[in-house]
Amino acid sequence: MIGKVGTFAISFLLAYSALVGAPAAAPETEDVALQQARELLTGEHKDTEQAKKLLLEMVQGKGRDPLSLSYAYVYPGYIDDKAGSRQLAIEWFQKALAVEGAPAGILDVARRGLTRPITWIRHLDSVEATAPQGNPPANPTPAARPKKAYLTDQRPVGLAVATGLSAQERRENFEALWKSIDTTYACFALKNIDWAEVGRRYRQRLDAVTGDDDFYLLMFQLVKELKDSHSWLQNYSVPQVAYETVLRTDLFAGKPFVVAGAQAGWEVLSVDGATFKEKMDALRPYWYAFSSERAYRRDVARHLLAGEKGSETRVQLRAPDGRTETLALRRELVVKNRPPVRALAFGLTRQRFVHFGRHPSGLGYIWVESINGREQVADEFDYALEQLRDTPGLILDLRDNTGGFGQQRIVGRFLRKRTLVDIAHVRNGPRHGDLARHDSYLDSTGKWQYTRPVALLVNDLTGSAADLLACNLRSARRVVTVGTTTYGNLSGVSVFAELPCGLVVRISKGYLSDAKGRPIEGNGNVPDITVEPGVLDFLSGRDPVLDRAVSVILDRARVPGRSAVQ
């Protein structure tokens, strides 16, 4: 099958970075004062007094970008911790956490600083030095490559992968990564992964690797064997070449259809002579990992026609009346990970993350489009809920929400008492089955709680922190869930492996279950009522998921005590 499909896979080799929002190191731009302060803090003979003076001038000034400003708060915390001024250090770390838009790696260091002294930062202190016991090295900026594999629960930033590796170096780095995963990954048993067998297969492939790109691709594919969308290569990806045609596609009832363009509603039979299944099989080795097959199918279907700029693709389509047509299309438009269009027959008040309105039935409707923000999301939700306080029931829409940050405050608005909302299973020993259990309870939040019936709308794009939000609300038994099974990527806490070649790999160290002990990772949140829209629903603007939810909540609101699960 490599013939006709292989060309597509290589030309797509891959649009995946742009398609799924693949993680990449953020560009680090800093001002001169920060560079000078860093030089004063680097090495054994630090001039902490002069460095702190520069940093204080930075934070007192205006117009600092979030990256530089967050450094300017973390570094004084480090200085004060080294001087034994713990309370002053904590105050600096708190200020760093308040910087909106600060890089995640720096925020991780600041969070650690709230619980333990930060007296050793890799890029400021000798790489040969040993960090104090119980205080893993912080690394918010570029660092020298470690001489041996290193595991840390902080996201390293700034490491670049080595090139020109010898066969022996490739072997050593491969073994270091395989062992790091073997000793830290939490979901081997959950996903029935035989890691020893995976190692044997990849060692055989390693013998045939001759270049750097092939080696890092092999490492990428090794991590993909975990089938975990939260485990990835942190600082290596293939070139992001991703362009699309004038037609857009999506998945309905397991088949790809055109959803935008002159042929909207037509089924895609083949692309460059290959069926949808053949495309999925060909792309699988190069696409970023997905925790569930349904999420992978959906993503491929939505980007089925993408490829290199200017390249031509031949697409065979079938019209609703059964006739077929083959089109030659050129890829010229930049791929954008657009969410499906949301058609509503009533108006919404729009905010940045949370939109709301009143359904014609009288029910409240809140659409949490994104939770890729922290307190602002909860603040917007609180405002929306306040405006809908008098409604007899509520529709909470999490469809197409791919995640962001946990929103415990939102969950608490629906709780009357302290409630078990999820269970974490975290790797805590050398054996694959060594997992510690941690029960998570939430209390009520806000000045009042919404206690009337609530329907939660989900689909296969509801993932990560949105999957957690769905899990928490379901565990609290505060919602009836309507739609299709969620993405199912909820692997929890992570650890980072730094390899001698400079490669940084994120590894999931835990996974989450609902209050009944059912793992969400891979399985997803299964709705109480399954409703799957068809392509004709989409094209006509009908929303059978919302319609069913409204019917159920109205029924429950009118008949006190009656179950909403029909």
Image (tube, rainbow, N blue to C red):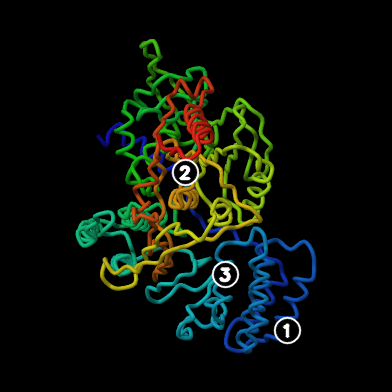
Which of the two marks, 1 or 2, is nearer to us in this view?
A: 2
Q: CA distance from mark 1 to mark 2?
A: 49 Å
Q: Which one is earlier in the sequence, the residue at label 3 or at label 1? A: 1
Q: Secondary structure beneath disc 3?
A: loop
Residue 275: x percent and y percent?
31, 28
Q: Which residue is mark 2?
A: 462
Q: Amino acid at mark 3?
A: Thr
Q: Which residue is mark 1?
A: 50
Q: Which one is earlier in the sequence, the residue at label 2 or at label 3? A: 3
Which residue is located at x 54 percent, y 80 percent? 116
Q: Is residue 532 above or below residue 290?
A: above
| Residue 517 in view, yes or no | yes
Residue 166: x percent and y percent?
32, 66
Residue 33: x percent and y percent?
73, 72
Q: Is residue 512 above or below residue 462?
A: below
Q: CA distance from mark 3 to mark 1?
A: 20 Å
Q: CA distance from mark 2 to mark 3?
A: 33 Å
Q: Quadrant of residue 367?
A: top right
Q: Secondary structure beneath disc 2?
A: loop
Q: Neighbour class for label 1 at 10 Å: few (<14), some, many (≥20)?
A: some
Q: Quadrant of residue 393?
A: top right
| Residue 405 in view, yes or no | no
Q: Which residue is mark 3?
A: 141
